[in-house]
Structures are given as C-alpha cells and as structure tokens.
Image (cartoon, rainbow, N blue to C red):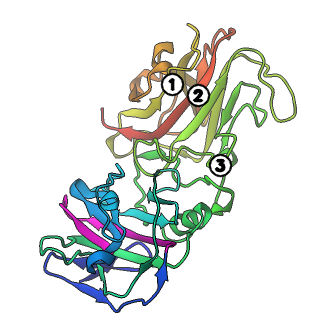
Amino acid sequence: EWVDGVADAALVLSEDDLITIAPLDVTTDTITMTGWIKPAKVHGRTGIIFMRAGALTTGIDLMPDNQLGYHWLDVAESWQYESGLVATVDEWSFVAMVVTPEKATFYLNSVDTARELTRVHEPVTFSGDLTLGSDTHQAPRRFAGALDDLRFYNRALTTNELAGLISAGTRPPQEVDPMVIEDFDSYNAYGGDGGQWVWDVWSDGFGGNGTGSTIGYEFEPVMSRDIVVGGGQALPLLYNNTGTFADLNGNLASIRVSEISRSLSPAQDLTRDGATALTLWVRGDPTNIAEPTDSLYVVVKDAAGSEAAAVVASPADLLKSYWQQKTIDLSSLAGVDVSRVTEIIIGIGNRTSPQTGGIGTLLIDDIVLSAK
C-alpha cells in the first residue's frame, strides 16, 4: 500500500510483506544507509535495509523496543551493540548508519543525535539479496509500518550531507497548529539549511537591544537539536546580567536584564479557539549562576502599546536540568488586550528594578496557547 510519505510516496508494510532487491555485487568496508521509518508498533528485531547471507549478514536494523542497531558480517559485537536511539511508534524518524573501517556511527532525526561504536569493520561482499523492512532469519522479523526514501551509499556521507537529507526537502511536512505561537523548529541550525536564522525573527542583546541576551549557540548547530520538548529544535537563550555583556558592536548592555522579543504581525488573538492560558517550556542548567533577582518573565504587548508582565520561573528553576512547563493565565495580564497582541518578550532578571545578576544558558521551547 502506498501513502503520502516524507520525500514522496511511502510504502506501508505489514508483517506478511517481503521486499527484496537483487545483490549489489560490491565489496566494501565503507557504506552509508539512510531512510525514513514510521513504525506501527514496538518491534522485537527487524531489518530496515538488510542482507541475511550467513557469515556475510550485514545491514541496518531495529533491535528490541525499536532501538536502532546493525549487523556487520554477523559478528556478535555488531548485533549486540545497543545504540540507545529509539524510533517512536506512529511518528516519522530519520535513521542513518555510517560505517568506516574504524567505526560505526548511528543517527536518529538529527546529526546531533548520534552514537558511535569504535571497532574494526572488515570488507563485506554484498552478494546476497537485500531486503527492505525485514530480516529473513526468522519470520517474525518483519517491519510493520511505513518506509520512505531508503538509500544505500558506497561511501561515508559527511554530517553536512546527512543534515541535507534531513532538512533539504525531506523533512516530513508539519501541520500548522493554530494554538502554536512559536515552536522554533523552522529556523536554521546550520548555514546550509537555507531558511531563516532565529535572530532574523527574534531580537536579542547581542544584536543590539540593550540587554544581556544572546539567542543561539556560538557554533553550529546554533539551535538545540537533541534536547527538545517536541518537534526538532529548541531555542538556546544565553543570559548575562553581570554588567559585563557587550553586543556585536562592543557596546555594553545598558540594562542589567536579558531579554529577547518577537513582533507579531498581524496582531494575534491569544483567546482564539477558547484559549485561556499561554504556556512555554523552559530547561535550566545546574552550572548556571542565578542570583535572587534572576527570575524568568514573559511580557505581552498589545496594539495600543499597553503591556503586562508575568514571572514564570524562579532563580532556582534556572538551575533545574529538566523541562518545566510554565503557564500564564491570560486573565492575569491586566490592562492588555490579549485579543490584539503584537509582541512577546521573554526575559531574565528584575524588569522593574534591574540589578546585577547572574549568567547562564536556558533552553526555551513550544510557546503555545491552551485551555487551562
């Protein structure tokens, strides 16, 4: 059965299906296998791109619990390896395996979510049939779900090439959720992504807004790709309220808070579809320095220029290395027309009485409306 997939049409397999490809007749110790998979269940073992051929058995597969794995010349050290990368049931996942003579590297959904096994890989002769979505060693080792854009390369792809497969036209289409204000998934993480940078949409202190904030990491990927709430990315927000922060032109921050902001045009109605609350997710770090004045707050501005602020996280929350959902009741934003919001500001510090504070990094994700 063919259905809409990631790159084009995807093939849906049941556990009764068996797809084979004639032998490739190549001998190599360097390959890349990639593809998009959408498991319909939690599997035991099953092949993705696989050759079951006795001592030559080689390929990328799923281990128990949908964990990404592999075989190489049927050596136990390969098929016993646990990558810890798990494909989610009923969701599209990009999987890749890059093998060289010295190591095997596995990727799930991002070049930043990778696991590496260092071991010798002797050359394999691909003289047997390749199967897609199955391992013919045992009948139960059949994939149930959808497969799309499966690829075999007789070389090791670079991380930039893998990132290109993910982002350049092969990312699954995302439905627009009317309750989402910002999910940070559409911005560039790498220079070759071809889209917008997050600082093209959000302003920060490094760009000259007069505060001590910087959005995005200094080096690529500039977005968080492996620590997220949902989707594919989260926003790194670096704050510096020490009074030593300088922007890209060397100007010291004029105010000892750290703020980022996004303009909304046209104005957005935060009460749409019955919404009564604005929520966002924040993740701290125990290495952060958070002084008593370093609270996390959100400011909402309306079309008339009125604004209201709500403190959503304490200094202690900025040290917690797990995701925390913070909720603002829209009725608490007194004096603001929440049906005509034109700007959202996220800040760290004491906005009404700025004081010297700390320094650190937060992750922000999924700013959405909800019915509280």
Magenta-highlighted residues: 29-50
**Residue at disc 2, secondary structure:** strand
Residue 345, quarter of the rendered image: top right
Q: Is residue 38 magenta?
A: yes
Q: Is residue 130 above or below residue 238?
A: below
**Residue at disc 3, secondary structure:** loop
Residue 176, quarter of the rendered image: bottom left
Tell me the residue at 76%/15% (across/down): 243
Label 1 Cα crowd, 10 Å radius (few <14 / some 14-19 / many 20+): some
Tell me the residue at 34%/64% (across/down): 70
Separation (CA) of disc 2 from disc 1 = 7 Å
Query: Contact, CB < 8 Å: mark 3 with mark 2?
Result: no
The residue identified by callout 3 is: 220
Q: Is residue 146 magenta?
A: no
Tell me the residue at 64%/25% (across/down): 239
Label 2 Cα crowd, 10 Å radius (few <14 / some 14-19 / many 20+): many
Q: Is residue 146 above or below residue 253?
A: below
Tell me the residue at 51%/43% (across/down): 234
Residue type at tag 1: Asp
Who comes first in sequence, dot 2 or dot 1? 1
Label 3 Cα crowd, 10 Å radius (few <14 / some 14-19 / many 20+): few
The residue identified by callout 1 is: 285
**Residue at disc 1, secondary structure:** loop
- Numbered label attached to residue 361: 2
Who comes first in sequence, dot 1 or dot 3? 3
Residue type at tag 2: Thr
- Give coordinates of residue 108: x percent, y percent: 42, 57
